[in-house]
Image (cartoon, rainbow, N blue to C red):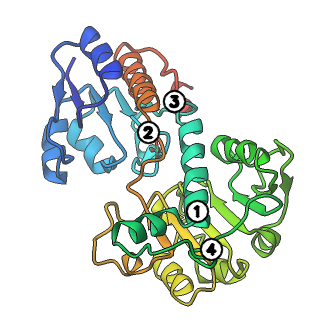
Amino acid sequence: MKIFITRIIPDRGLDLVKEHFPTCDIWSAEMPPAREELLQHVRGMDGLLCLLTEKIDAELMDAAGSQLKVISSMSVGMDHIDVAAATARGIPVGNTPGVLTDATADMAIALLFASARRVVEGEKYVRSGNWKTWNPKLLLGADFVGATLGIVGFGRIGQAVAKRAQGFDMRVIYHDPSAQSAYGAQAVDLNILLRESDFVSIHVPLTEKTRHLVNADFLAKMKLNSILVNTSRGGVVDQVALYDVLKSKKIFAAALDVTDPEPLPTDNPLFELENCLIVPHLGSASQHTRDMMSLLAAENLIAGLNGERLPNCVNPEVYD
Ligand code: DGY
């Protein structure tokens, strides 16, 4: 069997793949393969294990050839893969749900707290030698107890955020027509959520429907002095509109774990703003979580190559 793995993944998963298929082809550079390199490397492969940095579309599947048996992504998000094109070719696609729920929810809370309590601004202030004395009006932020947290997208991660917010005595509301209530969160219409939330945390997948969901209109409906947190996908936020509301201080701050594109070029205007905190897509970046993601991705790959049903398949209709 010929296998291409588009980057060195954590040992937990890599060792398992090698145990079953010792001769897999692994892209070992720090940067992902460029498009042309990827198209060349997939040629003749039976299995592909990729990351969210690779665009896996119909062209790539055709370049691989009709023997391609499985596409396994070490991610839960699927916006980099044309799943419909894979289904049309009978190729099962695997992802890694569940294992990154807690780590990503933790990051959403970390970003929410960091921007509400101005942790990064404070750290820069100290390092730059500006800290002269305790000052009763220095870097004042927002409180959590009694504040309202609005969660947009109430799937696994959104619910895990709600669970954490309970511990801070926050009122939690959510908008997600397809979800049931959990952790005392109350379902509301999106307009109500934006009008009432002191914090808005985004947890929707990126689809054609959710692209730029957080646009000028959405942001204009947010409360004055509220905070936006995005740990889903950068494309969900219209960054030009976000810049405008942050610059004019219509909302207090934004904290982004994800941007569009990634990495965000350093001349992007968002970097000029003290009230915009940006980290490099670290939602799932804990050792254990990444180990588990690599393991799930390896299990999907191996199952697909052995002609078995993938343990975590996003297009089970291929088996019908
Ligand atoms: C995913 O798996 O989709 C996450 O964004 C990785 O952190």
Q: Which residue is painted at 41% across and 77% down in the image?
A: 270
Under mark 1, the amino acid is Val
Residue 283 visible at all: yes
Number of labels in the image equals 4
Residues at badges 4 and 1 in contact (C-beta under 8 Å)?
Answer: no
- Along the horizontal axis of the image, is 94 left or right of 67? right
**Where in the figure is residue 60, as x and y percent of width and height?**
26, 46
For label 2, the residue is 75
Q: Which residue is painted at 60% across and 64% down in the image?
A: 117
Q: Which residue is painted at 79% across and 73% down in the image?
A: 191
For label 3, the residue is 313
Give the class, few, some or many, for how many residues have Cα within 10 Å of label 2's Cα (few <14, many ≥20): many
Residues at badges 2 and 3 in contact (C-beta under 8 Å)?
Answer: no
Can you tell which of label 3 and label 4 is closer to the viewer? 4
Instruction: Please tell me which residue lies in front, 75 or 109.
Output: 109
- Along the horizontal axis of the image, is 239 left or right of 128? right
> Is 206 located above or below residue 288 in the figure?
below
For the C terminus, the image quarter is top right
For label 1, the residue is 229
Give the secondary structure at mark 3: loop
Under mark 3, the amino acid is Cys
Q: Disc 2 beta carbon < 8 A from ligand 1?
A: yes
For label 4, the residue is 140
Quadrant position of residue 48:
top left
**Where in the figure is residue 65, as x and y percent of width and height?**
23, 35
Give the class, few, some or many, for how many residues have Cα within 10 Å of label 1's Cα (few <14, many ≥20): many
Can you tell which of label 2 and label 1 is closer to the viewer? 1
